[in-house]
Amino acid sequence: MAIKKKPAKQKVSVFGGSSISATKVKNEFGQIFEKVLRGERVVITRHSAPKAVFLSIEEFNALSRPSVSKIDSLSAEFDSMLARMQTEAAKKGMAVAFHATSEELGEAALEATQSKRG
């Protein structure tokens, strides 16, 4: 009479998927791969500690996609700041600053400090 082995219980991880040891992944890759293709996440552990996650390419792409709105927002902010720095007054001020002596720069810094206090 053959003794039937009970299937090993899979732990449910905090990530919402199965938690499986790296050894089991190595030995049962095909079955685990099918789970992932059905939409399940699989957390791979080593010595009971989570080390990697096996997930579908769709889920990976969704997680990896940069947020377009944040990029657009930062780009618009940069463009606005650059436009403010490109005015004629700003260009003249920078030309004066680049051609100023160290004494002139020191005096301008003191004047700016005193005007903020007064």
Image: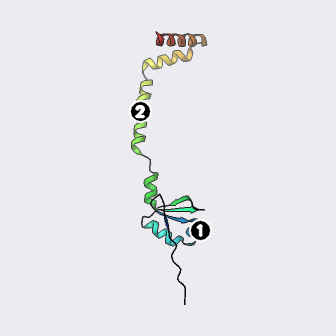
* Vertical placement of residue 61 versus 2, above or below: above
Q: Give whichever of 7, 71 is nearer the camera.
A: 7
Q: Give whichever of 20, 84 is nearer the camera.
A: 20
Which labelled disc corresponds to residue 23? 1
- Percent coordinates x, y for residue 29 in the rendering: 54, 70
Q: What is the number of callouts on the image?
A: 2
Mark 2 crowd level (few <14, some 14–19, many ≥20, 10 Å Cα)? few
- Percent coordinates x, y for residue 92 in the rendering: 47, 16
Residue in the picture at 52% in, 73% down: 8
* Vertical placement of residue 3 versus 79, above or below: below
Q: Find the residue positioned furthest to the bottom.
A: 1
Q: Amino acid at mark 2?
A: Glu
Label 2 – label 1 distance at C-alpha: 50 Å
Q: Give whichever of 87, 116 is nearer the camera.
A: 116
Of the numbered discs 2 and 1, the one sitting upstream in the chain is: 1
Q: Is residue 40 left or right of residue 110?
A: left
Q: Quadrant of the N terminus?
A: bottom right
- Provide the secondary structure element on which disc 2 rests: helix
- Percent coordinates x, y for residue 11 in the rendering: 50, 65
Q: Amino acid at mark 1?
A: Thr
Residue in the picture at 42% in, 36% down: 75
- Provide the secondary structure element on which disc 1 rests: helix
Q: Give whichever of 42, 86 is nearer the camera.
A: 42
- Percent coordinates x, y for residue 16 in the rendering: 44, 60
Mark 2 lies on residue: 77
Mark 1 crowd level (few <14, some 14–19, many ≥20, 10 Å Cα)? few
Which labelled disc corresponds to residue 8? none
* Vertical placement of residue 91 versus 37, above or below: above
Residue in the picture at 55% in, 68% down: 25
Nearer to us of marks 2 and 1 is 1
Residue in the picture at 42% in, 67% down: 38
